[in-house]
Amino acid sequence: MSDILTRDLVVASGRATTRDEAIREAGELLASSGAVTAQYLDAMAERERTVSTYMGNYLAIPHGTNAAKDAIVRSALCLVRYDEPIDWAGNPVRVVVGIAGVNDEHLGILGKIAVIFADEDEVRRVLDASTADELYDIVQRVNT
């Protein structure tokens, strides 16, 4: 699998203050990298209206609906961390991982992210990282 997370898709201090803004921020990162078309951003918002993408341990993984598969150009992942928790339907989120997967590639990606965020020490490292470079180093193992 080629690199799905590149350094330019890691943001250490996101701008969003609401769930919808955070989903848009992640979607715009994916779109600006050429991984998805603008249509995918709407599908990410639609997915959230259908089912929450909150995963626990300060993590949400917004992604598009199945109907938006044609809007995915290539598999990619972005990570945006927030200094203050965002209210995600009553749950605190500080890390948003936007994801777009071709075919079933996203399942492997999701599994690798889940492993990182299942470990409280790893979550703390992600939350405490001081730069985007440090964040990238912590989570880049999803590329292997």
Image (spheres, helix red, strand yellow):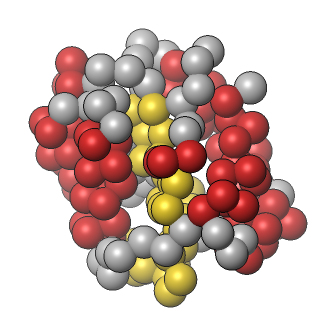
Compared across the picture, whether 121 is left or right of 101 comes to: right
- The quarter in which the N terminus is drawn is top right
Residue plotted at (26% across, 40% down):
31
**Of 14 and 22, the residue lying toward us:** 14
Count of marks overlaid on the render: 0
Residue plotted at (43% across, 39% down):
99
Most extreme residue toward the right, as rendered? 121
**Of 90 and 21, the residue lying toward us:** 21
Most extreme residue toward the bottom, as rendered? 84
Compared across the picture, whether 20 is left or right of 142 comes to: left
Q: Is 83 drawn above or below residue 66 in the view shown? A: below
Picture quadrant where residue 86 is located:
bottom left
Residue plotted at (50% across, 86% down):
84
Question: Could you tell me if residue 109 is visible in this image?
Answer: yes
Residue plotted at (36% across, 54% down):
26
Compared across the picture, whether 2 is left or right of 36 comes to: right
Question: Could you tell me if residue 114 is visible in this image?
Answer: no
The percent coordinates of residue 81 (x first, y second) are 53, 68
- The quarter in which the C terminus is drawn is top right
The percent coordinates of residue 60 (x first, y second) are 49, 58
Q: Is 52 drawn above or below residue 101 in the view shown? A: below
The percent coordinates of residue 102 (x first, y second) are 40, 18
The percent coordinates of residue 137 (x first, y second) are 74, 50
